[in-house]
Image (tube, rainbow, N blue to C red):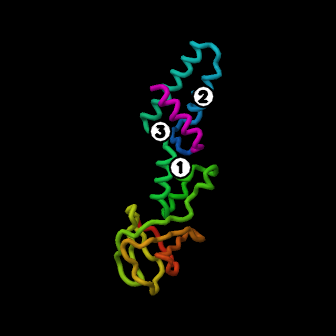
Amino acid sequence: MHFKWYAAIVVALALGYPSLCLAEDDPQSIIGDVILCQEITDSSQRLECFDGNVRELQRVRDAKEIIVVSRENLAKSRRNLFGFPSSDAPFVNGGSEAEEEKIEELTTTIKSVGGGEGHYVLTLENGAVWEQSESGYMTEPKSGESIVIKRAILGNYMARISGRPAFRIKRRR
């Protein structure tokens, strides 16, 4: 049991996501205190330090003031949130350390098409709904076609379906 906690703490620190900690009392200091316990040379004091800090860590976890997220789950969340303004939030991107991991484009498949000419609404295979945000003629998209959505300037997004000309698109839900 203690190994799982220690592993979770190490994973959280290794991932470098300080903003995942949401407690009023800085949970990062609790994690730091747990790690500092290993420097105590007296066995009984070290055990007392670990026990006390792990109890506090468990309290903030149970109160949902701190969470630990795997890299895999964080990457999945980033892909699912791509296109929302909150997808730039530090808890999604991991702060400045994860800038190289920020998603700049998404390649997926169209699940269904709604709307009509000049105003298509596309549901993607992950359930995300995107809407054509500039009117204009384009070949009607079809279910099963590949779509690439890229970040553009000023918070905009551009989409290209099966290699055809790009168009502006916005995330609806």
Badge 3 element: loop
Cα distance in 3D space between marks 2 and 3: 19 Å
Q: Which mark is residue 91?
A: 1
Residue with the mark numbered 2: 35
What is the magenta segment's predominant secondary structure?
helix
Q: Which residue is mark 3?
A: 65
Q: Residue at x 37, y 62 (%)?
A: 127
For residue 136, side relative to residue 112 (left or right): right
Q: Position of residue 13 (x, y in %)?
A: 58, 38
Tell me which segment is drawn in magenta: 1-17
Identify the residue at image location x=49%, y=64%: 83
Asked whether residue 7 is drawn in magenta, I would say: yes
The answer to whether marks 2 and 1 mark residues whose Cβ atoms lie closer than 8 Å is: no
Residue at 57% x, 32% y: name it.
31
Q: Callout 1 environment at 10 Å: few (<14), some (14 to 19), or many (20+)?
A: some
Query: Looking at the picture, how far across and down is residue 128, in whole percent?
Result: 40, 64
In the rendered structure, which amino acid carries the disc numbered 1?
Phe
Q: At label 2, which amino acid type do we have?
A: Ile
Q: Nearer the viewer, mark 1 or mark 3?
A: 1
Q: In whole angstroms, how far apart are the C-alphas of marks 2 and 1?
A: 23 Å
In the rendered image of this protein, does residue 26 appear above or below residue 142? above
Q: Which of the 4 image quadrants contains residue 172?
A: bottom left
First in sequence, mark 2 or 1: give its number: 2
Q: Which quadrant is home to the N terminus?
A: top left
* First reached walking from the N terminus: tag 1 or tag 3: 3
Task: Determine crowd level at label 2: few under 14, some 14-19, many 20+ residues with C-alpha closer than 10 A.
Answer: some
Circles 1, 3 touching at the beta carbon (< 8 Å): no
